[in-house]
Image: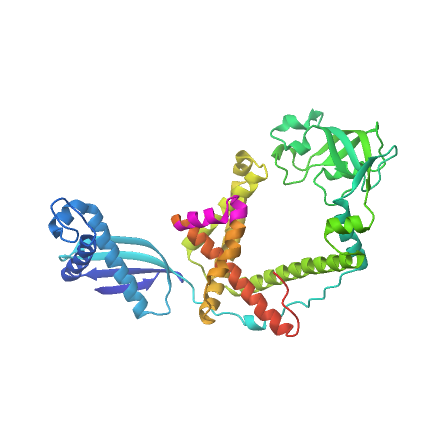
Amino acid sequence: MKIHSEPVSSVVQKASVTFDAKECEGAQLSVLKRLQATATLPGFRKGKVPFELLKQRYGDGLEAEVRQTLLQRVLRQIKDDRPTLKIAVVTKADFSEKDKGRLLEAEFEVAPQLTLPNYKNFPLEPMNIVVSEEEKTIFIDRLRKQHATYETVDRAAKAGDYVKLSYEGTVDGKPVQTYGDVPPLWGKQTGTWEEADAKDGFGIPEIVLGLVGLKAGDEKDVAVHFPENFAVEALRKKEGTYHVSVSEVREVKLPPLDEDLFKKLQVKDAKQLTSFAEASIRRQKEYAYASEQKQRIAEFLIQSVTSDLPPTWIKNTTDKVLREMVNLFSAHGVKNEEMEAQKEDLHEKARAIAVDRVKLNLCFEKIFEEEKLKLESHDFDPIILQESRSLRIPPKQLVQKIQQDEALREDIRMKAFQAKMINWLFVLLFRKAHPDTETPAS
């Protein structure tokens, strides 16, 4: 086997390989022996089918196996000759006959040679977590609200009251719902409930704010601005007018901090409730801190990669990101026609995300190798649980699907790998920066 290779670019190589007749015969014999070991034909015992009959039976399939065997020998030889070269994907493998042997013209993409940044000394931001009395009060009030009563009042609505209302919007004199497949929230509503002036509610913001000061029987026109990413393109950035009618106002009556409430909340007393609130808020802030620092670590690693990347990796990852985006948009009611209109923009965004993912994975793989880390069975548990919730199937059923679906199995493995690496890096850096502090949950 004679191999002549040369670079096409920093991440693409081409090779010309000559196999003599003996090497080709050897490859065919290897494939025939492998097929013979499992082949069964009438009149022959398993493992005893003659080679000539196998050639007749498998035909083109045999030739494809021989070519694959020869190609794998080439790749192994290249790896032996150049241990630092990592072949990412073979993009071309054309065989032809030559001097009773064969000629292989191949092209393959290679992973770039990375020089990792000094990730072990990457500085995390300080973790200064303080839980204020106001935050504890708000948290406890949210718990109380779960057991609140709602009393009808004969007065104008105040912030926090619940208001029963109906509304219908128009844009340029036409009903909003005539502009296409408008999400129900933005169309015509009859007898719906909204919390007046709710900052984190799901209603139309201008309407929610406009409820303050209205009482049962009041009507009001509210100007509404449609966001630039609105599901219906014809309404984006437009201003509409919604006619709002209020039929009822209810005041939220929080239960007192007494033994009955403590029992419902499974705490002993007000002191234990306050301690629970503080611990819960602290965990939330620790989780947010860990997430922010992981994002900073990831961005640091991504920015360190300045080399070219294998085009096929970028294409395949871009396609995967696009599928994720389409699934997400579909789940939020965005129609195919809307996504088609944004096709170029979506592809550009997906490619940018794909480039970052490939860069980050390259860094992760190199760190994983240098640190001699291993993927353990427990690394898969949170990923399987998360995916089973996303797919709305029991974890055991997902495990069965993973065993049967190679693509799904690789997807789960990659997610577990990525989660392990970013968690490992965060814990490493946090313990270095805060040796006497317990690592926050993440």
Q: Find residue 191 and report its horizontal and vertical position in percent.
A: 74, 29
In the picture, residue 241 is in which quadrant? top right
- Taking the spot 13% from the left edge, 44% from the top edge, the residue there is 42
Which quarter of the figure has residue 134?
Answer: bottom right
Q: In this view, does 150 lie to the left or right of 416?
A: right
Query: Is residue 376 covered in magenta?
Result: no
Q: Is residue 315 visible?
A: no
- Over which residues does the magenta segment extend? 388-403
Q: In this view, does 76 lie to the left or right of 340?
A: left
Residue 329 on image: x %, y %: 56, 41
Q: Looking at the image, which is closer to me, 73 or 57?
A: 57
Quadrant position of residue 10 = bottom left
Q: Does the magenta stretch include residue 389?
A: yes
In the rendered image, the vertical position of residue 287 relative to residue 224, given as above or below: below
- 158 relative position to 387: left or right: right
- Judged by its main secondary structure, the magenta piece is helix
